[in-house]
C-alpha cells in the first residue's frame, strides 16, 4: 500500500510489513521516516542491518546474497538499499522483483530513493514493492502548511510559541525543514521549555532561508511581491552580485514577452510555451504571470531592466538594489512604470 510520511507513526504500531519504500526529496522527513522504520525493526527482533548503495559498479548479487546468507549474529535482518537516483537500471529492477518473489520471512527490505518520476512510479520494481510492502511518499511542506508544521515541531520540543513566533521562524527558514528543526533545537537549548515569542526567535534564530535567484523569479511570477522582496533582501544580504539577479529577472521577462507576442499573433498557448521552451511543470506559473501582464507592460519591464543594467554598470545614476526592487515589484504585478 501507499501512505504519506505523516501516517507512518500510526502504521508502525502494528507488526512491520516485509518491505518499505521511502521516496522523496525532503531530506529531514525522509531520514526521519527511515529512522522510525529502523527503530521499529530493531524492537521486533531484526537485530542485524546490512546496507547496500546502488551506484556505478554495484553488484546486485550482493542484495540476493544478503537475504540468502545465514547470519552469525542474528536470525532476522534489515536489508537497507539506497538508490540515490531512483533508477536502479534493468539489473536492479530485476533483483528487486526477484527479492519480492522470494519473500524471505527473516528479512525486512528498506529501500530509500529520491523523488520518483512518473516513469519510475510505474516501473515493475516500484509496483512490486508497493504490492508487497508499504510505499511512503515524502512530500515537501509547502508555504501554506509550513507554519502549522513549525508549530507542531515546536510543541513536540516543549515550546509554546505564539503566532508571531511561528510565522517569524517559518519566514526565516523559507522551507528548509532541516534548518527549521535545528533552530527549534537551538531555541529549546537556549531558553528551555515554555512560552516563546517573536522577540525570542529574532534573537536566537539565524536566517537560514534558502534564498536564490530561482526562488526570487518564481515568487515574482506567482504575483507575490512581499515574498519576492523578502527574497531579494536575502540575496542582497548574502552578497550576491546584482548583475546575477538582473540576469535571472530579465530572462523571465523576455520569455514572457516572447510568449505574449506569439499569443497576439494567434498561436495557441501550449504551442507558444513550447516555442519558448517552457517546461511543463512551470507552465501554470507562466500562464498565471501572463494573465497579469499585457505585452505592453512586459515591454515596459524590459525597458526598466535596461535601466537597471545601466545603473549596475555606472552609466546611469541610481542604486542598483533599489532599481532591482522596482523590477521585482513590477514583475510581481505592482504597477511601477
Image: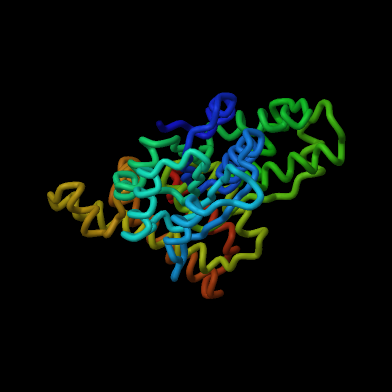
- Count of labels in the image: 0
What is the x, y in percent for residue 303? 39, 61
Answer yes or no: is residue 181 visible.
Answer: yes
Q: The N terminus is located in which quarter?
A: top left
Pick whichever, 96 or 245, lies toward us.
96
What is the x, y in percent for residue 320? 57, 64
In the image, is residue 217 above or below residue 155? below
Q: Looking at the rendering, which quadrant does residue 319 occupy?
A: bottom right
Q: Looking at the rendering, which quadrant does residue 323 occupy?
A: bottom right
Relative placement, left or right, of 218 versus 152 is: left
Question: What's the coloring here?
Answer: rainbow
Pick whichever, 181 or 252, lies toward us.
181
Answer yes or no: is residue 117 visible.
Answer: no
Residue farthest right in this picture: 191
Relative placement, left or right, of 43 versus 275 is: right
What is the x, y in percent for residue 32? 61, 41
Q: Residue at x 43, y 58 (%)?
A: 85
Pick whichever, 19 or 195, lies toward us.
19
Relative placement, left or right, of 16 versus 35 is: left
Residue farthest left in this picture: 266
Pick whichever, 126 or 226, lies toward us.
126
What is the x, y in percent for residue 321? 59, 60
Q: Residue at x 76, y 32 (%)?
A: 157
Amino acid at each position: 500500500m501507499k501512505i504519506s510520511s505523516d501516517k507512518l507513526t500510526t502504521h508502525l504500531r502494528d507488526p512491520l510489513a516485509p518491505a518499505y519504500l521511502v521516496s522523496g526529496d525532503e531530506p529531514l522527513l525522509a531520514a526521519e521516516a527511515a529512522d522510525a522504520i529502523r527503530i521499529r525493526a530493531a524492537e521486533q527482533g531484526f537485530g542485524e542491518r546490512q546496507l547496500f548503495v546502488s551506484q556505478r559498479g554495484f553488484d546486485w548479487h550482493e542484495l540476493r546474497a544478503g537475504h540468502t546468507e545465514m547470519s552469525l549474529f542474528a536470525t532476522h535482518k534489515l536489508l537497507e538499499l539506497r538508490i540515490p537516483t531512483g533508477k536502479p537500471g534493468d539489473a536492479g529492477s530485476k533483483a528487486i522483483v526477484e527479492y519480492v518473489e522470494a519473500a524471505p520471512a527473516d528479512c525486512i527490505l528498506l529501500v530509500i530513493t529520491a523523488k520518483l518520476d512518473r516513469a519510475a512510479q510505474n516501473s515493475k520494481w516500484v509496483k512490486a514493492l508497493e504490492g508487497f510492502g508499504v510505499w511512503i511518499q515524502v512530500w515537501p511542506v509547502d508555504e501554506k502548511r509550513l507554519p502549522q508544521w513549525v508549530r507542531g515541531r515546536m510543541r513536540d520540543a516543549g515550546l509554546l510559541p505564539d503566532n508571531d513566533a511561528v510565522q517569524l521562524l517559518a519566514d526565516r527558514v523559507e522551507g528548509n525543514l532541516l534548518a527549521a528543526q535545528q533552530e527549534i533545537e537551538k531555541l529549546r537549548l537556549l531558553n528551555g521549555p515554555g512560552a516563546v515569542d517573536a522577540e525570542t526567535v529574532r534573537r536566537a534564530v539565524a536566517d537560514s532561508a534558502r534564498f536564490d535567484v530561482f526562488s526570487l523569479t518564481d515568487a515574482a511570477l506567482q504575483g507575490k511581491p512581499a515574498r519576492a522582496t523578502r527574497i531579494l533582501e536575502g540575496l542582497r544580504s548574502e552578497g550576491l552580485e546584482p548583475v546575477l539577479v538582473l540576469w535571472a529577472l530579465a530572462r523571465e521577462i523576455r520569455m514572457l514577452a516572447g510568449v505574449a507576442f506569439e499569443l497576439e499573433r494567434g498561436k495557441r498557448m501550449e504551442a507558444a510555451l513550447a516555442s519558448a521552451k517552457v517546461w511543463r511543470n512551470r507552465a501554470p506559473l507562466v500562464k498565471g504571470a501572463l494573465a497579469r501582464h499585457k505585452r505592453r507592460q512586459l515591454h515596459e519591464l524590459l525597458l526598466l531592466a535596461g535601466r537597471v543594467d545601466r545603473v549596475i554598470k555606472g552609466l546611469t545614476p541610481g542604486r542598483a538594489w533599489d532599481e532591482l526592487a522596482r523590477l521585482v515589484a513590477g514583475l510581481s504585478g505592482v504597477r511601477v512604470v
